[in-house]
Amino acid sequence: MTDVMISPSILSADFAELGAEIQRIDTAGADMIHVDVMDGHFVPNLTFGPPVIEKLRPHSNKPFDVHLMIAPVDPYIDAFAKAGADILTVHPEAGPHLHRTLQAIRATGMKPGVALNPATPADIVDPVIEDVDMILVMSVNPGFGGQSFIESQLRKIEQLRAKIEACGKDIILEVDGGLNPETAPRAISAGVNAIVAGSAVFKGGPEHYAANIRALRPLVTA
C-alpha cells in the first residue's frame, strides 16, 4: 500500500451494479473498499448488511473497511466476520462496553477500529488505543454522503496523531466525510494516512475513477 491509503465509499457507487463498481475502483487504484453500514436507528439512513457484503466479497481482494453505524453492535460481529469484513469499526456511543466490543472483533480475526463523530472528543480513545488498529474521524455527521467537510476536525486529527505516535502502535488514522482534492491534503497534513471518499471518487463515471483516486493522493507521499 502507499503511504496514504484511499478507501472509496461504495455508498456513492451505482447500486445497480455494485460488484462491477468494486472491481472498477480496485483496478483504478483503491487500497481498501469502504462499506458504510447504517441501520436507520443509530443514523438516519439504511444501507448494507452482512448478506450484501458476503456477495460483494469475491469482487476484490482488497481489505473491506467496514464502518458500522448501528446499535447494538455486538450481536452482529460474527456475521460481519463471516461475510468477509477485514476491518470492523464501531462508535463508542453504539454500546455500553467499547473495550469488550473491540475484544470481540479481534477474536474473530478482524481488525478492530473506533469511529469518532464530530462531537466525540479525541480523548475517548485513551482507554482503548492499545486495542485498535484503526481510528476513524468523521469529518461530517454520519448518515449521508455528499456533505461538506467540518474544519474543526483537523484539530482532532492532530490530537489523535499525537496519541498514536505516543503509544508507538501502527494504527491507521482515517478520515471520512467531505474529502476531495482540496480538503484531503489538509487532513493528510494534520496526520491521517487513510482517506475515505465517495462522491470524489465516483464522480464522472468509471472512466474517471483512476484519475479521481490519484487526485486524492498527494505528492507529499513520494
Image (tube, rainbow, N blue to C red):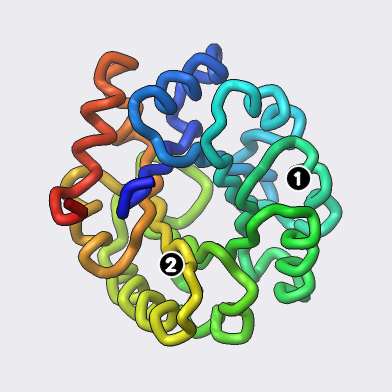
State left or right for residue 9 relative to residue 41.
Answer: left
State left or right for residue 99 relative to residue 66.
Answer: right
Q: Residue 81's mark?
A: 1
Along the line of sight, the residue nearer the viewer: 42 or 76: 76
State left or right for residue 111 relative to residue 119.
Answer: right
Mark in the foreground, 2 or 1: 1
The residue sitting at 30% across, 50% down in the picture is 148
The residue sitting at 30% across, 68% down in the picture is 191
Q: Tell how many labels.
A: 2
Where is residue 177 shown, x and y percent of the image? 38, 50
Q: Residue 118's mark?
A: 2
Determine whether 153 is above or below 3 in the image: below
Where is residue 32 shown, x and y percent of the image? 47, 41
Answer whether residue 111 is visible to the viewer in this image: yes
The residue sitting at 61% across, 51% down in the picture is 87
**Label 2 residue SS:** loop
* Sequence-earlier tag: 2 or 1: 1
Furthest toward the right, the residue is 75
Name the kind of residue labelled 1 in the image. Answer: Ala
